[in-house]
Image (cartoon, rainbow, N blue to C red):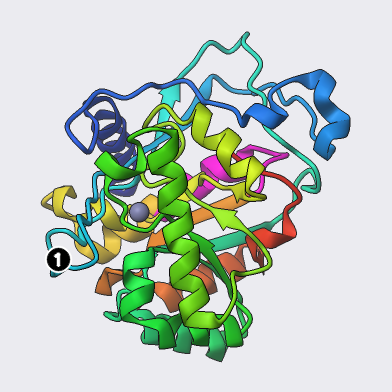
Amino acid sequence: MKHKFRIDFIALVVLLSFFAGCDGTFSLTKPITDPPVSTATDEEYRGEVTYSQTSDTDTGNNDSQSITSASEEISEKTAEETEAITEVQTDASEPVEISNATVESGSKTVYLTFDDGPSGKYSAQILDILEERGIKATFFTLGTYVDRNPEIVKRMKDEGHMVGCHTYSHDYSSVYSGAEGFKNEIKMWESSMEKALGSIPEEKLFRFPGGSVSKETGYAKEILFGMGYKGFDWNAVSNDCLLSSKPEDMTDEEYLKDSLISSLEYSFNLKTSPHIILMHETYFQTVEMLEWTIDYLTDQGCSFGTLDQLDSSWYF
Ligand SMILES: [Zn+2]
């Protein structure tokens, strides 16, 4: 009973955090689709189909991290992330259009993603565990950190992980300042990657800071598509970014595990969606529970993939 209560409590907390907005603003609750895949008649474009939700829930996400400039010392506070998954009421009769090119119904492939690196804090420990377990993941990196820790990005690539773009600064006032500002953030990230690796990754993967529903991102999605990027939100999360607001009677470990288990249950019920798990490489608690996470997912019959294996963008 206590366990069930905790999961319900977590759902309530993340729901409230979404409506309140982790960055202190109210957020749109309806999913926004990628413009190039926004119509059912557009199926030939990238092979997508229109998917109508079978439940009356949808995901939203949020975050409030702001890394203000490359030259600014990045503190614990600025590294704090508040991305979270929530379940939000939507009109069940309204079809939700998402791309669905390669995901088989009932697929238990999960995609581990780590945002906001390479901070240099716990990157090496995460990479060690993934290497030991023979698992590949996707890292959504910030150009400002790539500049500081190019050797970590090189290791990610050398060990077969995907290195995606999470913008240069993660600073909302820059990232979401308009088309020019957004494009500049991508270009600056690419420049950082070129310096670190000698070239931009062949697979162009992108994640919006705060997720695609946290801001008006329609124009940004068009820019991304034009630049050859695929964008990815998430539909499962450990809520490592919300540890500071967890229930008082829960340990960090209990909170992370319960959050992951309950959100995965939600994700697995989305029969034709890929199961994309959001974590951050800036929390030691995430490192501490990574082996448990891998064991849990393996016990659930999951295999592990990288986002380049999906043929199109996924915005939830
Ligand atoms: Zn982020």
x then y, percent, for residue 139: 49, 67
Q: Magenta stretch? A: 260-274
**Left/right of residue 189 with respect to residue 255 in the rendered view:** right
Q: Nearer the viewer, residue 136 or 70?
A: 70
Seen in the picture, residue 272 relative to 236 is either above or below; the reply is above
x then y, percent, for residue 143: 38, 65
x then y, percent, for residue 267: 56, 43
Residue at 44 percent of width and 62 percent of height? 189
In the rendered structure, which amino acid carries the disc numbered 1? Glu
Q: Nearer the viewer, residue 120 or 267?
A: 120
Which residue carries the number 1 mark? 72
**Left/right of residue 171 with respect to residue 201 in the rendered view:** left
Q: Which SS type dominates the magenta stretch?
A: helix
Seen in the picture, residue 171 relative to 122 is either above or below; the reply is above
x then y, percent, for residue 241: 27, 54
Residue at 42 percent of width and 88 percent of height? 151
Q: Is residue 261 visible?
A: no
**Left/right of residue 312 with respect to residue 281 in the rendered view:** right
Quadrant housing residue 223: top right
**Left/right of residue 285 with respect to residue 303 in the rendered view:** left
Is residue 132 rendered magenta in the image? no
Quadrant housing residue 8: top left
